[in-house]
Amino acid sequence: MMLLNHLRPGGRHGIARDETRDPIGYTLAVLNRLARSELLDRVGLRRQAEQTVFAVTRGGFRTATTAGRVFARAGARGRAGRRATATSPGGVFDLTPTDDEQMLVDVVTELATEVVRPAAADADAACAAPAEVLRAADEVGLALLGVPESLGGISEERSVVAGALVAEALARGDLGLAVAVLAPGAVATAISTWGTDEQQQTYLPAFTGGDALPAALALTEPRPLFDALDPTTTARHEGDELVLDGVKSMVPRASEAELFVVGARLDDRNVLVLVESGADGLGVEADPAMGVRAASLCTLTLERVRVPAANVLGEHDGTTYAECVRLSRLAWCALSVGVGQAVLDYVTPYVKQRQAFGEPIAHRQSVAFMVADIAIELQAMRLLTWKAAARAAAGRDVSRDVALARKLCADKGMKIGLDGVQLLGGHGFVKEHPVERWYRDLRAISIMEGGVLI
Amino acid sequence: MAISLDDPKKLRPLRDQAHQVAMNMLRPISRTYDRAEHEYPHELDLLASMIDGLSESGASSGAGARGVKRDDTGAAADEGRVRNGTNLASVLSIAEMCWGDVGLLLSLPRQGLGNSAIASVADAEQQERFGRLWASMAITEPDTGSDSANIRTTAVLDGEEYVLNGEKIFVTSGERSEAVVVWATLDREQGRAAIKSFVVPKGTPGMTVERLESKLGIRASDTATIRFEDCRVPAANLLGSPEVDSVDAAKGFAGAMATFDNTRPLVASMAVGCAQAALDLTRDLLAQAGVEVDYDRPALAQSAAAAKFLQMEADWEAARLLMLQAAWMADNARANAMEASMAKAKAGRMASDVTLSCVELCGSVGYSEGELLEKWARDSKILDIFEGTQQIQQLIVARRVLGLSSAELR
């Protein structure tokens, strides 16, 4: 009986639970188990050793999170933190970035072109961001973009627009690396935007003093039809502590992160909770996905993890959590625009060079119109993202704006990824060209919650 | 200068006023003139005078068909300042009017495409003579639709007059207008460069309105066939330069096509307005049926109807922002041919999807003449066709993106 249960097909390997095996199926299943056994390797039967993805995945066992540093408590517990001021738009329709924003975009574009793109293919294969890419991002101070000047950061006003422009420019280089680079900034931005004086004084110095603290915003959970506003991760009061239980997925660079912001349900309301990586009961397991691989995506497990009750970030009534979900989705929108632009940049010269039937395939309307549609929908994605970002920076309710941007970026972004591969035909399917990576990456946009924040 | 995509503050009163006009003057007669095709909506005379009054007083910020004029000199004068001018005013107000009724908007006296052409291309003397006329636009011929470079109507200079010969179809407000802007060729051998537009006032001997079409939608708007037989107009009625100068394309066909760079965002705004009408009503009908869209929850975690609505609203917003972008560029004297085509392409296909899907979502309530949803689903189709079909817009965008000539990408 045990054996039969073990060999039941459903629930694993992408097989639905109501699938049944006939006798030959059982034989095949057993043969397959044998095929995977290390015995084959020892007797030299397997031609090529399978390449394992990054360290913590090997064998699939779970490890504790990194021990991390000790954060010395500082600041006043009850006092509100400092905030970047909301922008005050003049009511003029305008698509021109400010001079400061443009300068930032120019710098990040260079970073994306010179450092990020050349490292993208290897980082995708290795499921890890190379140190030099992370270092280069630190030099630009990307993690501090959402931190106000008064707290050691670089912005005076709420920098949502700059954040969107930077995310787009970085993702034009590579999405996985962009997420890896921006992950610490998500936590720094969250603490700056919603933290108390104590939280800001305790944690922000770790971001502003040179290298950015590895940190991650964990909101996604591993289940079908996941709704970010209905997390199953729970927090409950126990004395003056909170006890957290749950599982978070798609957490970027979680194996090295020293600080997490975790979404959880507390007293029937959604809250954000600061969790240091040294906490008992915190586990991390590599969970490489279809795309965004350079971000070293992991599953974060919380089993009776205890944190001080004062670690709730922002309001307890669900409003901070909802705002965080929206601004994170907006960051993903901006990232999708960057990837879409990368696709357009790549297919444009390709279809003009590739010859078929004696002329460039770009001379065929069926090809040219696909490129035109990429350009049209991409610009629309960008405008919806910018609109939501500008309204968020001005302190407006962006629930609808973000929902529409996310819907368009998810749908049209995926279409762009699909057409990018199609335009290259068989060449698009092989890793010699980056379009297959963008195809995998763009599937993430409608799925990801957390990870990045602007 | 800072990125902001909200409707311009100074144009919001105009937008809201247009919405009120649409609600209180167009909607009440919308179904009436859909049924009574070819009957003149005399209620519009009052409205047209009102719009003229607003233009005179400057209160309209130049909204309407004549708001498409490019003012390159003004842009240079206030260098560095971002302008929200007549092009934005036009798309915002026309979208609201088309939320009321596309067919009636197209029938508004003195708001025709011909007026846009005159506003775009005419010199000061011509503005003076024709600026107050209701002008329709005659381009399409029985054998020439999208390839307007291939028109056969001829214009031959004879002394101080041009003699026009040919047949034009699909002339919006061709019967009701006071003048027709006719596109004709000075010399078919010389292609685009020889194509010019001429203002022909009604009553000019040799011009006859032959018949009116019966149509799928925008039935309130009359669509005429006009024949020109040795129709003589003064040489001074030629819009733009009379030179057949293929070197300087701006003076030739491309100059006439420049009208479209300015009017394509207007057609996009018609699609945006029509689709918004369908979305607004459908949202209400769905709410009555117990379906409300939750913007914070994933579309797929909601009902199929709510998910579809979210997708439609996202596409609608996409078209609207592309429309605003194209108009904003025109206001700031930036070349916007590609962005104008992007706006029209997106808005055209969006309006078809939105209006047809709203009928489907609302079931027999949507399909019945008891509501206006079925009408909007008929009206919207033309918006993906006239002033350049979906495919023509894609062609224009593709050529620009790929850097290909019309000879390479045909």
Image (cartoon, coloured by chain):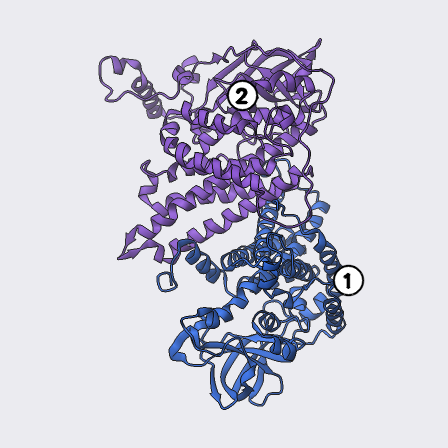
Residue corresponding to mark 2: A215
- For the point 48% across and 27% down, the residue is A139
Determine the chain carrying the residue at label 1.
Answer: B
- For the point 71% across and 23% down, the residue is A316
Query: Is disc 2 placed on a helix, strand or loop?
Result: strand
Camera-nearest residue between B250 and A415: B250
Query: Is disc 1 placed on a helix, strand or loop?
Result: helix
The tint chain B carries is blue
Give the quarter of the image for residue A313: top right
**Rendered location of residue B134, percent (x, y):** 65, 76
**Rendered location of residue B243, percent (x, y):** 46, 78
**Mark 1 residue type:** Asn
**Rendered location of residue A121, percent (x, y):** 36, 32
**Rendered location of residue A231, percent (x, y):** 62, 25
Residue B108 is at least partly visible in this image: yes
- Badge 1 crowding class, 10 Å Cα cut-off, few under 14, some 14 to 19, many 20 or more, is few
Horizontal side of A178 relative to B204 (left or right) equals left
Q: Where is the C terminus of chain B found, in terms of image quarters?
A: bottom left
Is A251 drawn above or below residue B293 in the view shown? Answer: above
- For the point 60% across and 53% down, the residue is B320
Camera-nearest residue between A188 and B28: A188
User: Same chain, marks 1 and 2?
Assistant: no
Give the quarter of the image for residue A227: top right
Give the quarter of the image for residue B51: bottom right
What separation in Å lies between label 1 and label 2 (alpha carbons)? Answer: 57 Å
**Mark 2 residue type:** Ala
Is A155 drawn above or below residue A366 in the view shown? Answer: above
- Badge 2 crowding class, 10 Å Cα cut-off, few under 14, some 14 to 19, many 20 or more, is many
Mark number, residue B24: 1
Chain letter for the part of the structure drawn in purple = A
Residue B177 is at least partly visible in this image: no
**Number of residue marks:** 2
